Image (cartoon, rainbow, N blue to C red):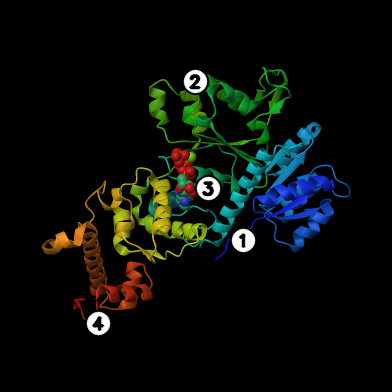
Amino acid sequence: MKKEPIQVLVVDDEPNMRKVLRVLLEHDGYEVHTAQDGLVALSLLSENHIDIVISDLKMPRLDGMALLRRIVEDHEGLPVIILTAHGTVDTAVEAVKLGAFDYVTKPFDRKEMRQIVAKAARTQELARVDASVDRDSTTGRYSIIGRSQPMRQVFEILDRVADTPSTVLITGESGTGKELVARALHENSGRRGNPYIRVNCAAIPPGLIESELFGYEKGAFTGADTAKPGRFELAHNGTLFLDEIGEISLEMQVKLLRALQEGEFERVGGISTTKVDVRLVTATNQDLRRRISEGLFREDLFYRLNVVNIHLPALRERPGDIELLVEHFLSKYNIRLNKKVQLVSAAALELLQRHCWPGNIRELENVIERCVLFCDTEAVQPPDLPPDLYGHPRSEPPFRETGEIPLHTGDSVERGLKGQIKAATANLERQLINRALDQTGRNVTRAARLLKISRKSLQTKMKDLGLREEGGVEIKG
Ligand SMILES: Nc1ncnc2c1ncn2[C@@H]1O[C@H](COP(=O)(O)OP(=O)(O)OP(=O)(O)O)[C@@H](O)[C@H]1O
Ligand SMILES: [Mg+2]
């Protein structure tokens, strides 16, 4: 499978601009199409597959804003990067609120342009991957994987609160999917077509967070050459997601509380108040109640934020979902890394299910990505797993149910560690397969289903391991 180049459409009435962008982007490996105005762009869009649009604002016939509106309506998810002259930054900000991916001011900085296009390309590549991944395993409308009882509860609350204006606090350990849930709340609400703005409170220096959230007026501080709207304003009619809310300072907590209570705020250095209609979602992996008792978080703010709580279970509390997640990440990384790793062997899956996953789904995703990258066979085997899973399980020993694994101590010197591991794995697999066969009256089709692998893989595996289809007798190979 060869990776298709990303298709970029450049829309600008200045031939020179089209030329400059073509050279720059083709150099980076994109395929470039050009149009001199919005109407030509629309007809190109209807006939070609385009991944990214870069558009000027002022153009004859159909201008950039009008083009953007049409794209938002008819080509959902297509990123549009707006080119704007210095004087029209306000319009570009409007465009971002309407759904533009980002804007770049002219004359543009090559590095900035390349970075923004690369970011858009990446979102498009990920969208391609997501679209091709089987969605049966998710619960319908949300791209969140899970069928376990604790996850069903999460989906139930999501169903109930997504399309309401209620403020939601999402809690859960690191890597449990809080950002996915925040996004799902927005995508399943009436605000879907409006902005979804995420602010990572932990990533913004404390001194800048107020102007980031509430914006500033011209001259509010050195460097404030023009006024700038804050995230609250940008999120108007949409959803504002304040991630890592546990990190904000007490001083900022007071300001946030005031804005929430009064439904209005002032830009930094401004006097007039601004009112916005924003649905607020926050998330934290901290125990806010503890932070309250330590005097680090305001109780009144906590109650404002915690109108509805969605708590995400740790992965170790739902080992039943591991297999689904593994399948999901296998397809994702097979596509992304252009590999063909079909499955995780029953033995390796068992190790995955016994691990305690301190990094939760993010950790599992990283492990699977690594497996797909390094595995050169069809199936991931225990030795393909990272040493902390295969060598030193952090939870219980992995072979509890299957009993002792004979390590062929007699010829261990000749075999070396690698050989011993291979033999032990084969033994473990033999035991698991035999157990499945016993449970199904030695019906290979049903045993394969039980082991969650295809019948063909099971037959191949049995042949490799010297197992016969009928009767439990091992053929020594
Ligand atoms: N249920 C799930 N189904 C599919 N992917 C998931 C699921 N939960 C988490 N992920 C993936 O795991 C990774 C981590 O999730 P996310 O960033 O939402 O975690 P988080 O709870 O915000 O963590 P942190 O507190 O560290 O910010 C992401 O790549 C996300 O797509
Ligand atoms: Mg997060």
Between the C-alphas of marks 3 and 1, the distance is: 41 Å
- Element assignment for label 2: helix
Nearer to us: label 2 or label 3? 2
Quarter occupied by the C terminus: bottom left
Disc 2 to disc 3: CB gap under 8 Å: no
Q: Which residue is mark 1?
A: 4
Count neighbours of disc 3 (C-alpha within 10 A) and say few if under 14, some if 14 to 19, many if 20 or more: few
What residue type is disc 1 on?
Glu
Q: Earlier in the sequence, mark 2 or mark 3?
A: 3
Q: Earlier in the sequence, mark 1 or mark 2?
A: 1
What residue type is disc 2 on?
Leu
Which residue is at 59% across, 43% downward? 164
**Is residue 410 visible in this depiction of the protein?**
yes
Quarter occupied by the N terminus: bottom right
Residue 142's tag is: none
Residue 19 horizontal/vertical position (percent):
78, 49
Nearer to us: label 4 or label 1? 1
- Element assignment for label 1: loop
Residue 250's tag is: 2
Residue 470's tag is: 4
